[in-house]
């Protein structure tokens, strides 16, 4: 039966050796999860693997890649039960992956972001474009070098809560600061907190001028001092207040920066 004559979805037992993985939207393999599944492998508990049958007849895993890899590693599965979706585009595969995995704890924000790019989600594509435009390189889970940024969740939240032009300004600030060091979680989350809570605009005024004048090194050095002196965990509020402390360090009382009351 040709692809055009197959139903849109159906159940089929498939040799796991022929199942392929599209890295444009799939998350990275989790070796520890594969081992856990393999050690507790049970054909009755494997659950149905969701796959896409493309026009050329190849089968691509949409959901269940770690289970398939565990089945291959165990060597005890000639066939596995699959829910086959026929005639999907790569974009539709990515959209299905994102829907199925968004609420799962084992799937990182970056994996969801990557699938959004493949699915051509307009909000995700916009954020990806801004990241590149301001000279940042996304390298999850942790940035180590200049121009690198490792966190994605604060960016998606900022894009939702700020207008495009303002978001672009915030990202440009982060991008410029990262010329002197990686855009760490501490920096990005702290900047986001200030953008959301300062009593005056972060971008286009004296707050941005002050941050740029302080520069990367003094900002993070004073933020660390604030966290250490106050013995607080580095949650978003603490990180934001740490940057606020840096901005107000040595500044006259009448021109200090303030946060909106919580």
Image (cartoon, helix red, strand yellow):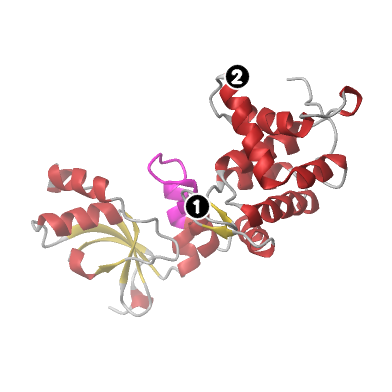
Mark 1 lies on a secondary structure that is loop
Q: Position of residue 227 (x, y in %)?
A: 59, 26
Numbered marks: total: 2
User: 49 or 189, which lies in front?
Assistant: 189
Q: Position of residue 56 (x, y in %)?
A: 34, 80
Residue drawn 77% across the image and 20% down it: 261
Q: Residue lying at the far left in this picture: please name it.
A: 76
Decide if residue 41 is in sight here: no
When the figure is inspected, residue 187 is found, relative to residue 60, above or below; the finding is above
When the figure is inspected, residue 97 is found, relative to residue 192, above or below; the finding is below
Q: Position of residue 168 (x, y in %)?
A: 74, 54
Residue drawn 40% across the image and 39% down it: 105
CA separation in Å, label 1 and label 2:
26 Å
When the figure is inspected, residue 199 is found, relative to residue 5, above or below; the finding is above
Name the side, left or right, on which 181 lies relative to 253: left
Q: Which residue is mark 2?
A: 230
Q: Which residues are magenta?
A: 96-111
Mark 2 lies on a secondary structure that is helix
Quadrant where the N terminus sits is: bottom left
Tell me if residue 12 is in the magenta stretch: no
Residue drawn 22% across the image and 57% down it: 69
Q: Residue lying at the far right in this picture: please name it.
A: 254
User: 99 or 141, which lies in front?
Assistant: 141
Q: Position of residue 11 (x, y in %)?
A: 26, 59
Q: Which residue is mark 1?
A: 144
The answer to which image quadrant residue 195 occupies is: top right
| Disc 1 crowd, CA 10 A, few/some/many (<14, 14-19, 20+) | some
Quadrant where the C terminus sits is: top right
Residue drawn 86% across the image and 47% down it: 204
When the figure is inspected, residue 189 is found, relative to residue 50, above or below; the finding is above
């Amino acid at each position: 039966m040709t692809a055009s004559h197959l139903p849109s979805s159906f159940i089929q037992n498939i040799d796991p050796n022929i199942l392929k993985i599209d890295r444009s939207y799939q998350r990275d393999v989790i070796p520890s999860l594969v081992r856990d599944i393999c050690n507790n492998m049970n054909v009755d508990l494997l659950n149905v693997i969701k796959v896409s049958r493309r026009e050329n007849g190849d089968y691509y895993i949409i959901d269940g890649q770690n289970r398939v890899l565990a089945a291959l590693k165990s060597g005890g599965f000639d066939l596995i039960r699959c829910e086959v979706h026929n005639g999907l585009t790569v974009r539709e595969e990515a959209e299905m992956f994102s829907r199925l995995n968004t609420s799962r704890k084992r799937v990182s924000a970056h994996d969801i972001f990557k699938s959004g790019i493949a699915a051509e989600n307009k909000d995700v594509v916009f954020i990806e474009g801004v990241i590149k435009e301001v000279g940042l390189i996304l390298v999850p889970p942790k940035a180590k070098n200049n121009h690198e940024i490792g966190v994605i969740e604060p960016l998606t939240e900022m894009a939702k809560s700020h207008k495009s032009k303002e978001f672009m300004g915030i990202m440009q600030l982060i991008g410029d600061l990262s010329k002197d060091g990686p855009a760490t979680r501490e920096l990005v989350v702290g900047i986001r907190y200030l953008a959301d809570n300062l009593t005056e605009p972060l971008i286009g005024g004296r707050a941005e001028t002050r941050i740029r004048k302080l520069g990367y090194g003094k900002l993070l050095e004073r933020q660390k001092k604030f966290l250490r002196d106050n013995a607080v965990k580095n949650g978003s509020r603490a990180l934001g207040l740490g940057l606020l402390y840096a901005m107000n360090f040595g500044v006259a009382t009448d021109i200090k920066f303030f946060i909106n009351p919580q």
